[in-house]
Image (cartoon, helix red, strand yellow):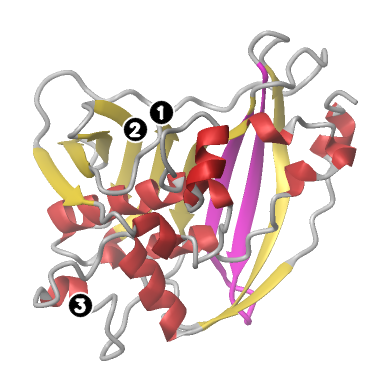
Amino acid sequence: MPLDYDTVKNWRFDEVRQRYDEKDTMLYALGIGLGQDPEDAGQLRYVYEKGLRSFPTMSVVLGYPGFWVRDPRAGIDWVRVVHGEQRLTMHAPLPAAGVVTGSSRNTHVIDKGADKGAIVITERTLHDEDGACLATLRQSTFCRGDGGFGQGDDSPEALPAAPDGAPDLRCEIRIPASAALLYRLNADRNPLHADPEVARQAGYPRPILHGLCSYGVAAHAIVKSCCDYDASRLVSLNTRFSAPVYPGETLQCDIWRMPDGQVRFLARTLERNVVVLSNGTAELKP
């Protein structure tokens, strides 16, 4: 059956209560490339229990409601969905270990037309045990086979494109060949990221990296380049997923400092010279 606007817009998500510990925090940080230089004290604070800190983008793997678009009631051709954008705003530091509750709702269901598909935007808030809001996440899911249902919401404000001209900063981070096998232990065990045969069936020559791992590596590059590895300064991070990354490639993050104090960025793979993250913005504390 086709996508049903009312059903998807009013989808009922159960709250997800999740306990995580220091091992989970270190595993996430290792998955986005922290600790590649084990003598770098800035990196070590995220991968070693002595004075351990959480990296803020770990919020994306906490309180996740699961792959709900696969439910036949949604009427979504789930095989053809891709992650379109990810937006994150931090309201308070994420503890290195604790219990969080994720509450999700669909805020937008956008009809792009029968030949262009649809976009579903899901908002998730993370709260600690005292009820304080730690983070707000907004994920755009591009449903390539589900446009043309004849109604829908207006699109939210688009993310700005990267400025013209040379970047102010450039950071390169090598993604280990085992990165997808490591990152999938955080939450997403889709075989597309591990099984060569599944990847070939999906049209890829080999398993691809999780988009949210690429997102985390870009955050790593910004925190390294702009914050001297003080990730508590990262307030928000938003980007569009433009192309897949393959484990073993090098991610080059180009960063522009803006007059309002924000930064804009894009990321490409050096080996293929392909932009994989575009329309990136980040807000940093002074």
Residue linked to disc 1: 242
Vertical placement of residue 219 versus 239, above or below: below
Amino acid beneath label 3: Leu
Q: Which residues are magenta?
A: 117-142
- Badge 1, how many Cα within 10 Å: few under 14, some, many 20+? some
Q: Residue at x 53, y 46 (%)?
A: 192
Label 3 to label 2, Cα distance in Å?
27 Å
Q: Position of residue 227 (x, y in %)?
A: 17, 59
The quadrant holding residue 108 is: top right
The reply, left or right, for residue 114 in relation to residue 93 is right
Q: Residue at x 30, y 52 (%)?
A: 217
Vertical placement of residue 98 versus 207, above or below: below
Q: Residue at x 73, y 17 (%)?
A: 147
Q: Position of residue 285 (x, y in %)?
A: 27, 57
Tell me whether the residue at label 2 lies in contact with that at label 1, contact meaning CB atoms closer than 8 angstroms: yes
- Main secondary structure of the magenta stretch: strand
Residue linked to disc 2: 276
- N-terminal label among 1 and 3: 3
Judge by depth and name the residue closer to the eye, 180 or 90.
Answer: 180
Label 1 to label 3, Cα distance in Å?
31 Å
State the quadrant of the C terminus.
bottom left
Given the current orientation, which residue lies at the most extreme front position? 197
Q: Position of residue 244 (x, y in %)?
A: 40, 35
Judge by depth and name the residue closer to the eye, 16 or 33.
Answer: 33
Tell me, yes or no, whether the highlighted magenta stretch contains residue 228: no
